[in-house]
Image (cartoon, grey):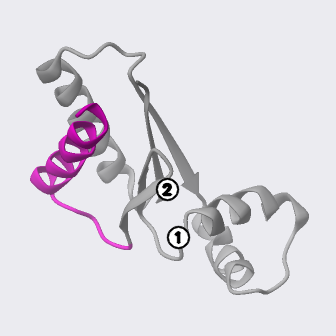
Amino acid sequence: MIINIKLYVINGRDDKYLEMIRRIIKDIMNELGLSNHIIRFVSVKISRDYLDIIRGMLLGGEGPAEFIPIINELREYKVFDLPALIINDRKIIEGYKSNPTEIKHLILNFINEITT
């Protein structure tokens, strides 16, 4: 069982939120005795400079070819607002910063779902 967690954030604006998520994941791994190979965490930082272009492309507009991979990822998860938390290819949170208790609860619930 591997749990893939991906967090899409706006670079600079969501740095503290990113660190909070990292701490929560580390705490959960310690509490449950999980190894580092069980939970894979990836953060994707999107520059504020390109945010309007990316939003436009998500809504069908044109933009630089180098943005196509991130646009395809965001469309795959149906993400249109940031921050967004994805766990095992399922969008859990989008468009708001949850508090630590809610994040921990959501991740633990997801772990319980896939292990029972």
Q: Which of the pair 92/96 is nearer the observer?
A: 92
Instruction: Looking at the image, tell me whether mark 1 or mark 2 is earlier in sequence order.
Output: 2
Q: Is 9 a magenta residue?
A: no
Measuring 26% from the left and 17% from the top, which residue is drawn there?
A: 34
Q: Circles 1 and 2: CB distance less than 8 Å?
A: yes
Disc 1 packing (10 Å; few <14; some 14–19; many ≥20): many
Q: Which residue is mark 1?
A: 79
Q: Which of the pair 15/2 is nearer the observer?
A: 2
The range drawn in magenta is: 95-116
Measuring 27% from the left and 65% from the top, which residue is drawn there?
A: 97
Q: Nearer the viewer, mark 1 or mark 2?
A: 1
Residue 104 lies, with reference to residue 73, above or below; the image says above
Q: Looking at the picture, how far across and down is residue 70, in whole percent?
A: 70, 58
Q: From the image, which quarter does the N terminus lie in?
A: top left
Q: Quadrant of residue 14?
A: bottom left
Main SS, magenta region, reads helix
Real-space Cα separation, disc 1 to disc 2, in angstroms:
9 Å
Q: Which residue is mark 2?
A: 8
46 sits left or right of 34 in the view: right
